[in-house]
Amino acid sequence: MKSILEYKDYHLYMQDYYDERKRLGAFSWREFSRRAGFSSPNFIKLVCMGQSKLSKIKAIQVARAMDLVCYEEDYFRLLVEFCNADRDSVKKAALFEMEKIAVDHKVRVIDGEAIQYYESWKYPVVRELAPMMPGACPHDIAEECKEYVSADEIRDVLEFLVKSGFLKKDGEKVYSQTEKTVVGSKEAMPVAIRSMHREMANMASRAVDRYSSRERYFTGITFSVNDESYNKIVDEINACRKKVLAIANAYKNVNQVCRINFQFFPMTDKINGGKHA
């Protein structure tokens, strides 16, 4: 069975633990629940199926029933907190603590890098900008950014991008992009991406007044859809996004970093037969 430090879903870890114990000998959901101190013989099975959740106290009981000790018990508790959280801030805090435990115990994880890369506009912008400015110092790069960023922040961003493999250092103050993409677990990436969407949406809002109509292009429409047209429009936006990226990649003599936000969201509840859905 894999180390608990490789998991991002406590339901899956508990199911794998049960399957492994079952494989090695007689073991039942009743026994599992009994070991954790639960009166219901099917409670843990329902948790593994996603039909029930573990509270903080129950998480500790289950961790000890699975013989998790020290950092393993701490990691499992954070795993439960991460999966149960409704707010991204709570999820992010739990993920960072989980990563710290994993790093301290020699297990490499990518989720921390993914969250850090997407938590600020500085990382993707500097990744694009630095290769355009060979020989530029952090202060020079900071001066070219429309949003305020200090030279020290740029220095830290460059160090992170090189260390994480997003940029390659070709010489003194000379950088090139690598082919590396930002990857992470299916649990961590939505948290990271939502953080970036919020930040970029705020920047777009400021851009309305900051730039003249010659420097930026904003447009929008309000319309009605059903489920089928919604899905077709999403497919069309994805196709457009890929085409725009292909156009941008076709040109090598680039001189500016830009951002496009595709925003398609509901402005009302669904109405079915003249009634609220």
Image (spheres, grey):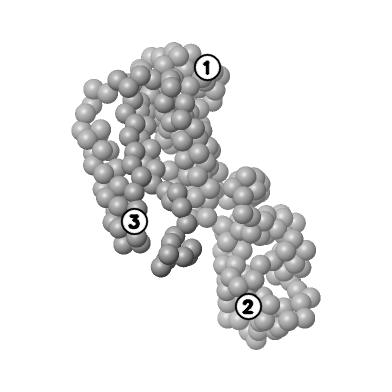
Q: Secondary structure at mark 3?
A: loop
Q: Residue under label 2, please give it.
A: 45
Instruction: Answer with left or right where residue 233 lies relative to residue 88.
Output: left
Query: In the picture shown, does residue 124 fall above or below 146?
Result: below
Which amino acid does the dot numbered 3 rest on?
Val
Labels in figure, total: 3
Q: Secondary structure at mark 2?
A: helix
Q: Secondary structure at mark 1?
A: helix
Q: Nearer the viewer, residue 254 or 75?
A: 254
**Mark carried by residue 151:** 1
Q: Position of residue 254 (x, y in %)?
A: 27, 23
Q: Residue under label 3, please give it.
A: 225
Which amino acid does the dot numbered 2 rest on?
Lys
User: Along the polypeptide, which appears first: circle 3 or circle 2?
Assistant: 2
Instruction: Answer with left or right where residue 35 lies relative to residue 152.
Output: right
Residue extending farthest to the bottom is: 26
Which label lies toward us, 1 or 3? 3
Residue 11 visible in the picture: yes
